[in-house]
Image: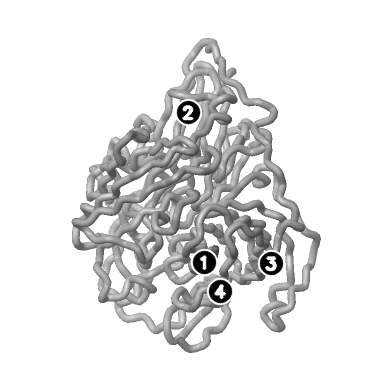
Amino acid sequence: MPMAMPAKHGGALCRHPVADQTQVPRLLDPNRLAPFVDPLPVPEVLRASSRPLQLVMRESEQRLHRDLPPTRLWTYGGSLPGPTIEARSGEALAVKWSNQLPLKHFLPIDHHVCGAEPDQPEVRAVVHVHGARVPATDDGYPTDWFVPGQSRRQTYPNRQDAATLWYHDHTMGIERLNLYAGLFGMYLLRDEHELSLGLPSGEHELPLVLSDRLLTEDGQLYYPVSGVSDAPWVPEVFGNAMLVNGALLPRLDVRARRYRFRVLNAANGRFFRLSLRGQRPFLQIGSDQGLLAAPVSQTSLFLAPGERADLVIDFAGLGGGGIELMNDAVSLMRFNVAAGQESDASRVPAVLREVVRVPESKATHARVLTIDEYADCVAAPMLMLLDGKHWHEPVSEKPRLGDTEIWSLVNLTEDTHPIHLHLVRFQILDRRPFDVDEYLASRTLRYTGPAQPPPPHEAGWKDTAQVYPGMVTRYIITFEGYAGRYVWHCHLLEHASNEMMRPFEVVA
């Protein structure tokens, strides 16, 4: 491929567009819909048993709002999101994933995208449990896909702490389309320590899976295209219809007591800035890889695609009223609080668990890795790479099993990128601003300010973290669990599809 020139994000496309005959349909204005008329859907819960769980990927229909026709979707188990899988730490769980999707995709494939070439089957799938420590053969490697009519059994050892995980499609080249179509669900891992804390549980613990979509006036998914007829990929997708558990503007009837909410940002590209109307405080008790050391009082939370947050909201004092969950100034849903006093035996301890900060001295290797965007007039309108390398180039990150490394992620773009590593959990060491222009000119890292430690809600164990523009974000990572080949990538799905994904190999 010819050498590309670095470009600011959002720069003009170099390719000369070919006339695109596709007409953009009339899109739905969600503000015209009656708010809070639909109850919040709660996904079915599947628990481990002596037999493998079975989940079928199939085309289905689901009404996203009372006043819309059913929407065509691709789902696990017939619902968006799919069933919530619950597992116990230390107890292995097997899932048979069955692909019964149609043979033709209903969203626009770009055959110029790596892994989606014209000679590949149009519909393919492979499942990744995001945040799970699993052998490489069960991780859902992007090229390990299977086609309609085939199944795949994957085993999850669950040898890790309790955490809010999730499962989703991870197929090379079309992951962005498969998730937009609806292929994702939650995977909750529990352990004895978490269960002993007395946190809200049972009917007082619920998932809140956030996503956004563009919908046509008749309630169907619309995936935007570039205007280049043979290359429809776009760098980001943002919808104006905000879904919570697959519903538009739902309501949840609660009592005047504490509730625990497992929050997942399952959007392709949208960051959610969450708050309760009026800036009412809530507690964050966990992040991606489980409980924090102590609860953190929040009035807002900025959540990137792929990130999770474990929240406790206390509705005491709101009996007979209600409060809305907001994304900036936009309402996502409403909590209606029943009148009267409510007895509440749940609690949120001042100490949740021990989270020992990993010292830098433990690291045996340090890597400096860039996040790059290029304007390329020959091959594509925009190219996105990690450390300047394409997917098919030789593996360059080969940590040893059991070793601890520091990865310094140098963001040369104007975007915040949520960078996710498979297999491992990590801690954020710090973020530090640097002179981007000087680095581009001479590959010299000149810092322009002090290192900033992670705020308390990011000081626990993570598997996805926000890498800010113009800053170096350092992860400290112990490569525990299994040897084998895994991937690291940006969790903005349109970026990951355009080569912002690289393999790494843990060697024994």
Screen quadrant of the N terminus: bottom left
Residue 183 vertical placement versus 16 (above, below): above
Q: Residue 336 location in percent, x, y?
A: 46, 24
Q: CA distance from mark 2 to mark 3?
A: 40 Å
Name which quarter of the figure residue 294 lies in.
top right
Question: Which residue is pictured at 59% across the width and 25% down the height?
Answer: 197
Give the label on residue 396, or none: 4
Residue beneath label 1, please? 505
Distance between the Cα atoms at labels 4 and 2? 43 Å
Depicted 360 relative to depicted 446: above or below: above
The residue under label 1 is which amino acid type? Glu
In terms of sequence position, does the residue under pointer 4 or pointer 2 come before the other?
A: 2
Q: CA distance from mark 4 to mark 3?
A: 13 Å
Structural crowding at the residue carrying mark 3, measured as other residues with C-alpha within 10 Å and reported as few (<14), some (14–19) or many (≥20): some
Q: Secondary structure at mark 1?
A: strand
Q: CA distance from mark 1 to mark 2?
A: 37 Å
Q: Amino acid at mark 2?
A: Glu
Residue 366 is marked as 3
Residue 296: tell me if it is visible: no
Q: Which residue is mark 2?
A: 205
Give the quadrant of the C terminus: bottom right
